[in-house]
Amino acid sequence: MKYNFYYDETEHSHIINYQTITADNFYDNFITVIVGWRETDEKYIFEKYKGFEEKYFRRMKDGELKSQTMKKKDFKSGFSSLNKNTIGFYEDFLSIFDEKIIIYFSVSNKIEYVIHQIFRNYNNSFFADIDLMKYSITKAILVYRPQKVIEAIYKSPNDFINELKVFLEDRIEKNKNYIPLKGRENEMFKQILLLLGEAEAPERFDWNYYPAFDGFKKLLVEMGITDYSLTTDMDGDEHKTLNAARDTGIEYVCEGDSKDYFGIRMADMFAGLISKLMQSLNEQLIGNYKNEKIDKKLLGIEWFSLNQRQLELYKRLHDIIFIYNDYWYRTYAGLYTDDLIAFLSLLSFMDRFSKGKDTEEFKIEMQPEYYNTYVCEQLKKHYEDMGNKLPIEFVTNDYEDYFLNQRGAKVYKDINRQKMLPIKAGKNIYEVLSVGLSKELLPLVTISENGEPICYRLPEAYSDWAMTVVGFANRGENFFPETVVFSCVDGKYFADIL
């Protein structure tokens, strides 16, 4: 069975220089999207997309409907910013996608790419985890935006190492006022300072396209697809995109004009949509350290004040990415994936609500805090995964349908297979080892049974409680292991930590 795939990207910077990174429209992430389907479904999908483009022909520019028609202001508070005049466009666009359409997208951070080049001669060892250091440097530059360091990267690469040292030393001193929050960061910065002596900066940074195609190649292997074609959008006389695909090992690839290939236009539109959402999340969650005041950044309540149509958009996008494309390599990213994690977490968080008014009934004022807790837990897992140097391979054995959590308990990938914790009338006393959340935001608890760790699901009524205790753990206050009394009184669930 042959498959046809189409590629496009957004937030493209052919050359990364000081003017690029300081431009008003600069976004730190380069996003690529590949859409595909069985060749026998091409006509069916074309007819659906043709109808969409004809309906919105007034949005076309130079005869094409492209992602430039999406306005950044429409996503200031995510989908809740869409009004009745704009929401129909996105409803119609997402309605095109179903189980027949494969979606793959990659997110590559531009600053991380620069850091990779500067530290290209460094390798992980028993004594130093260079991946964690690269991640920490990238995050520090993106969060604190040290002007002299950024200028040195592009204006005077030879001065970069010295400017980075000065910045890290200064940051360590300032962080001493916030040790509970910044203690781990200080320890990492101290390790980085010890290893900066031999780093060298290249003279110029040209964008590397390989990661996007590396992830796509892994997806093809995962899906067992060998008969395929990939068409990329035209990319100038040097054909950098095409050549990168070929060099990565994508055999059946060619270039095409987006005017002639509706699949390229679909990829462009999908890339534009997720890019706009990720940018809005980034702007809302990034801290402002100009006045050296460290505050926790939360999404505004308006992000969670949703009507039914706005909520359904989140749920539809969630299904397209998580349900219709339930593959390990549906997404691909580098070390710094904070924006991607925030975006995917938002979709999972919103999918737990069934009605737009649910966010108000479930304490709308607490939803920003609950979302923050969930994102922090996902970021923590990513950080821990980077520290695990065992290679991750796609699981092909049907019986390998679970993983072990940090306490060593079995957690099924299909959460419906997880047993519910027995909670009978009266008091139910358990030795709780940890509390967590599934990717569907369902509460989980790991208890000790005869000395063995066992993971159970909790009733959804415990969701707020689980988010609260996980939030405390992310801030350094972990309540477990501890004895917990679970009880159900008049249909209401309670948990008391002894």
Image (tube, grey):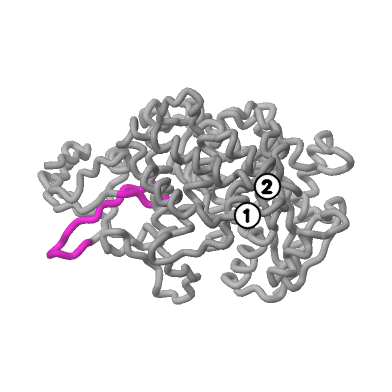
Q: Which residue is mark 1?
A: 105
User: Residue 10 lies in magenta, yes or no?
Assistant: no
Question: Residue 394 appears at what percent x and percent y?
Answer: 50, 70
- Name the image quarter holding residue 412: bottom left
Q: Is residue 315 visible?
A: no
Q: Which residue is mark 2?
A: 271
Q: Main secondary structure of the magenta part?
A: strand
Q: Is residue 372 left or right of residue 230?
A: left
Q: Magenta segment, which residues?
A: 436-453
| Residue type indicated by callout 2 | Ala
User: Tag 1's secondary structure?
Assistant: strand
Residue at figure coordinates x 34%, y 37% from the top left: 181
Are the residues flagged by discs 2 and 1 in contact, CB closer than 8 Å? yes
Q: Residues within 10 Å of mark 2 (few under 14, many from 20)?
A: many
| Residue farthest along the top direction in this orientation | 291
CA separation, marks 2 and 1?
8 Å
Above or below — where is 280 with respect to 382?
Answer: above
The quadrant of the picture occupied by the C terminus is: top left
| Residue type indicated by callout 1 | Phe
Q: Residues within 10 Å of mark 1 (few under 14, many from 20)?
A: many
Taking depth in this image into account, of 178 and 405 the one nearest to the observer is 178
Above or below — where is 380 with respect to 81?
Answer: below
